[in-house]
Amino acid sequence: MPVDEDPSVTAPGRHPAPTLELVAARAGVSRATVSRVVNGSTSVSTPIAEAVRRAVEELGYVPNRAARSLASHQSQAIALVAPEDVTRFFGDLFFADIVAGIDARLEDSDYVLNLMVANNDPSGKTMRYLGGGAVDGALVVSHHTSDRFLKRITETLPVVFGGRSAVPGLDAYVVDVDNVTGAETATRHLIERGCRRIATIAGPLNMRGSLDRLEGWRRALDAAGVEAGPVVDGDFTMLGGAAAMREILDSRHQVDGVFVASDLMASGAVPVLRDRGIAIPDDVAIVGFDDSAAALATGVPLTTVRQPMREMGWQMADMLIRLLAGETTVPRELILPTELVVRASA
């Protein structure tokens, strides 16, 4: 029995279930080409792939996941691994957009997504699951320097990281945004509107994205000959952003501009400024990062750096599917551009 056929017995008086061969004949291509299209490979030209999809729809062909998995030793499942606190994962719109992008790409494949929120995997159960054949590959987001178990995942499965990793010695496939340039552009915007005492609320400094945004902030200040203001870690949370803003205001530093490394932290910082009677942007201008829904929920529409979060998720999933299909031309790193969106806060 071909591994892609439905093994169910056809009911009397009904036509046999369509097979991979019938789809291939209808589309005028080989069986192998149909299999590649059904499994989500991007190595097939667009016109041929469209012909195959039309044949699949016309014949009502349904791939048999169980039979194919037994024959190929593949699960047809992908894990999304987030080494993060559960509350933060479900409370940050960044992750929602990433997952939406991943899901959009998987719709055109036969893979399903398994979510694993695993904070540093102290018990090892994440590694046992990933290494036990339950998934064919993994996508990893929001990783930290301390997440050493991620290196073991890359030695077990094909893995694509969302964001460059800060884990030492980790050589991986990566989809990221240009965090350095984005932060540099945001800080330069504050300087160009006259700010000269610019602080930053950073993300956790054990994450590469946070370090890159901090580097961009410093580059812009150095290029303009502006002295750096205080750097406070806001932990990429709303409460952390509020606490960081209070710490900056209570310090000896007088600030007239703040670059905040995420909109969520900025949404915590803005109410603190307003509660202190500080006008935005007249007294203190503020710029965030993400262009998430949080940028419009601060009371003052937030100037921010737009990063293509859904595109990032889509590209991560696409890269992994191509790796699983055996493609040899997949780039090791894909960096997506950012864009400054100017609103009332700066």
Image (cartoon, rainbow, N blue to C red):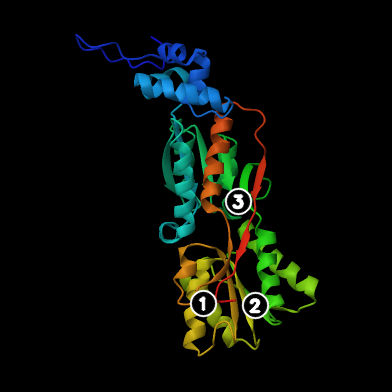
Q: Which mark is residue 269?
A: 1
Task: Provide residue 258's location: percent of width, then percent of height.
Answer: 62, 76
Q: Quick check: 235 above or below 336?
A: below
SS of the residue under disc 1: helix
Disc 1 residue crowd, few under 14, some 14–19, many 20+, Cα 10 Å: many
Q: Earlier in the sequence, mark 1 or mark 3?
A: 3
Q: Nearer the viewer, residue 342 or 179?
A: 342
* Residue 292 against residue 134 in the figure, above or below: below
The residue that mark 2 highlights is: 199
47 is higher (above) or lower (below) than 108: above
What's the residue type where badge 3 is placed?
Gly
Q: Residues within 10 Å of mark 2 (few under 14, many from 20)?
A: many
Q: Amino acid at mark 2?
A: Ala
Label 3 sits on a secondary structure element that is loop
Q: Residue at x 65, y 87 (%)?
A: 254
- The CA span between labels 1 and 3 is 25 Å
Q: Is residue 179 left or right of residue 147?
A: right
- Tell me the element at label 2: strand
